[in-house]
Image: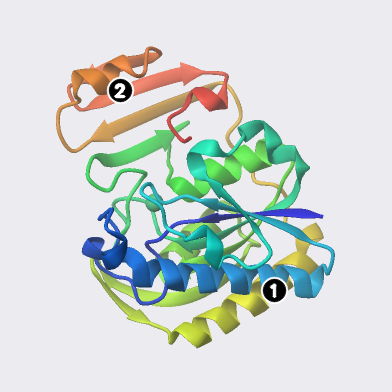
Amino acid sequence: MNYLILTDLERVAGIDSFRQTRTTDNEVKGPAMKQLAREVNACAQGIRQADPLAVVDVIDGHGSGGLFPEDLADSRYIRFKEFRLESMPQYAALLFVGQHAMAGTIDAPLCHTYSSLHVQYYRLNDVFIGEFGAFANWAGLHGVPTIFLAGDDKAALEAQLFVPPIETAVTKQGKGMEAAEHLEPDEACRLIRDGAARAVRRIAEIPPFARFQPPFVFEARYYEPLKPETIRSRPNARLLDERTYRIETTDYRELPFF
Ligand SMILES: [Zn+2]
């Protein structure tokens, strides 16, 4: 069966400052990228322990690149922007590695919602939503369950809010916006491998998450007044005030999640 892993850089063991993730300089974020690859490879190993014929695709979800493609062992590298949304139904399950909590979460290191510099919150059908819920719902709308998350303890709690039976691997304890207590990298990888294997064995117990059904009422609030180009890039958006817009649609792909 085919499995999809969605990655982000922020929640990798050992990373707790935006200086390590916001840069486009691979010298600075290189060590984080190396650890993310180790965690992704551990996740793929765990999947294959439970399903030896598994085919694993990996989406690099970090804007400026969070993985060196050559570091991935036996899985296919896909940039987020190049992922074909229509390909979702081919997957047996979705897994998250290196994930962080949504913006505004207490003591959640590097928490953000898509843009750490600009977005105060996203709400979908009256519920605060971050990157986990947004992508898990796209998978769920296609009948694909989200079975595993590796990240900090607050990201794991957020995943359990949306998908109560999900398997998680907690690689760090959040102590503040840029503070965390980390597991040793090897220990983090061991937890991820074991957790991913358990998740695949439990796949039938974890229903697809698709609580958000059309019509979708989406609201985005920014830290600063919206720039004219942000508004122009979203012709279906209606301004509620200078920092907030709303989109009403029946097409999930029109929401700014992808
Ligand atoms: Zn992110």
Colour mapping: rainbow
Question: Where in the figure is residue 10, as x and y percent of width and height?
Answer: 37, 62
Image position, residue 25 (x, y; %): 27, 58
Residue 30 in the figure: left or right of residue 42: left
Please, which residue is most extreme toward the front here?
Answer: 70
- For badge 2, the amino acid type reads Tyr
**Which residue, given by chain and number where applicable, does mark 1 sit on?**
46
Q: Which residue is mark 2?
A: 245
Q: Nearer the viewer, residue 35 or 107?
A: 35
Q: Label 1: few (<14), some or many (≥20) within 10 Å?
A: many
Residue 112 location in percent, x, y?
A: 32, 51
Does residue 155 appear in this view? yes
Nearer to me, 154 or 7: 7
The answer to whether the residue bearing label 1 lies less than 8 angstroms from the nearest atom of ligand 1 is: no
- Image quarter hosting the N terminus: bottom right
Q: Is residue 101 left or right of residue 23?
A: right
The three-letter code of the residue at mark 1 reads: Gly
Give the Cα distance between marks 2 and 1.
Answer: 42 Å
